[in-house]
Amino acid sequence: MIDDVLQALIPLSEPPSAPGWNHAAMAELLGDAPLRQASVLIGLREGIQPRVILTVRTHHLTAHAGQVAFPGGSRDAGDGDAVVTALRESEEEIGLDRALASPRGYLDCFETISGFCITPVVACIDGSARLRPSPDEVDEVFEVPLSFFLEPANLRRYAMEYRGHHREMVEFVHGGHRIWGATAAILLNLLERMKRA
């Protein structure tokens, strides 16, 4: 199952760049304002049943409080590339030991309503990795079977109005967690690259 995911990725040797795959929709809302660079880590915990690592952001954050998200954040000047950013942020947010993460490729860049261009980095995570949420940023770390996201029936589509614009949205609901927004859209990009959406 992980092999199917890895075959759909953009190789590490060919990192994606802006614009994001959703640029046309975001340009309507954001115009041509410059976007800040960020990275997230799509961690696939290895095992008999591979699992996707997700977080619940703390409720006191100024942006996206309480939402389900991949570990990640803004690129620092000294990061060098998207992989370094994703691993650094994952270490800070969920205590992931970088030695237990094996980056394998990228998904397409994604632009957010909050003004970021996110580069999703996919990595295999050793089954022994111990994760602990940083209370300043993360309320909870949880894992969802990869097979759940690969089942088309679990992808829910809906529409919403935002700033006078009609937006097509997707979400997943698993174990009481609503996975929506940028996180669900990045998962949709994976499914589309795998020809499963």
Image: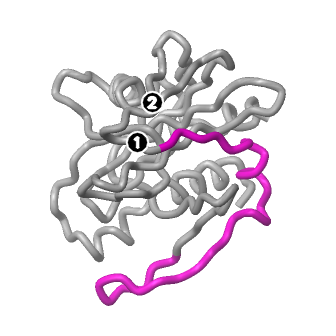
Left or right: 83 in relation to 54: left
Left or right: 54 in relation to 18: right
Residue 167 screen position, x and y as percent = 45, 79
Residue 64 vs residue 18, the one in the foreground: 64
Rendered view: 169 above or below 98: below
Residue identifier under label 2: 94
Rendered view: 172 above or below 101: below
Q: Tell me whether the residue at label 1 lies in contact with that at label 2, contact meaning CB atoms closer than 8 angstroms.
A: yes
| Amino acid identity at mark 2 | Ile
Left or right: 45 in relation to 15: right
Residue 119's disc is: none
Q: Secondary structure at mark 1?
A: strand
Residue 104 vs residue 92, the one in the foreground: 92
Q: Residue at horizontal 25%, vertical 34%?
A: 75
Magenta includes 147? yes
Q: Residue at horizontal 48%, vertical 22%?
A: 96
Q: Splitting the image into 4 quarters, where does residue 38 fall?
A: top left
Q: Residue at horizontal 64%, vertical 40%?
A: 143
Residue identifier under label 1: 138
Magenta residues (range): 140-168
Q: Secondary structure at mark 2?
A: helix
| Amino acid identity at mark 1 | Val
Q: Splitting the image into 4 quarters, where does residue 26 fall?
A: bottom left
